[in-house]
Amino acid sequence: MLQTITHIEKINTDNYTIDCLFEEAKKLRRVNIGRLLNQFPNTPIMQELLDVENFKQVSIDSFGALSWRNGVDFCPDVLFEQSIEID
C-alpha cells in the first residue's frame, strides 16, 4: 500500500526522530531519520540535517514525503517500513 504523511506531530532533535501521521495506516509512527543520515556519512547534503536548526526545518511536500529546504526528501513508503508505531 502506498503511504503518505499528512501530519508531523513532533520533531525530536535529541535523537533525530520525527513522529508522523501516515494517512493510509491512520497511525502515528516514529521515523528515525538519524539512522538514515548515518548511512550517508560522506554526503554533505545529508549531513547538513545533523545540524539541529536544519533538522527542525522539515516539512511535508506535495507527495506526502518528509522534505527539507536543502532538497533532501525521503519516500514515505520507505519511512513507513522503517518506522515504529507509537501510542
Image: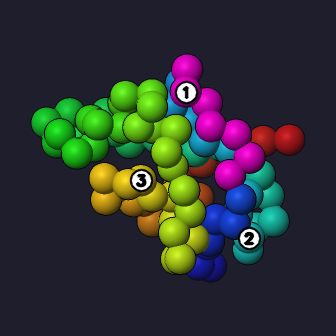
User: Is residue 37 toward the left or the right of residue 10 in the image?
Assistant: left
Q: Given this view, does label 2 or label 1 mark the residue nearer the observer?
A: 1
Which of the two discs, 3 and 1, labels the residue nearer the N terminus? 1
Kindly indicate the quadrant of the structure image that contains residue 45. top left
Label 2, label 1: how far apart the Cα atoms are: 24 Å
Look at label 1 and name its amino acid.
Answer: Thr
The quadrant in which the N terminus is found is bottom right
The residue that mark 1 highlights is: 13
Label 2, label 3: how far apart the Cα atoms are: 20 Å
Helix, strand, or loop for circle 2? loop
The spot of residue 39 in percent (x, y) is 28, 39
The residue that mark 3 highlights is: 68
Give the residue drawn at x 56%, y 36%: 17
Give the residue drawn at x 62%, y 37%: 11
Question: How many numbered circles are shown?
Answer: 3
Query: Which secondary structure class fits the magenta region best?
Result: strand
Look at label 3 and name its amino acid.
Answer: Trp
Name the foreground residue: 72 vs 21. 72
The spot of residue 43 in percent (x, y) is 16, 42
Q: Given this view, does label 2 or label 3 mark the residue nearer the observer?
A: 3
Say if mark 2 contacts mark 3, CB within 8 Å: no
| Residue at far top of view | 14
Helix, strand, or loop for circle 1? loop
Give the residue drawn at x 45%, y 58%: 67
Crowd class of label 3 (few under 14; some 14 to 19; many from 20; radius 10 Å): some
Residue 13 lies in the magenta stretch: yes
Name the foreground residue: 83 vs 47. 47
The quadrant in which the C terminus is found is top right
Range of residues picked out in magenta: 8-14
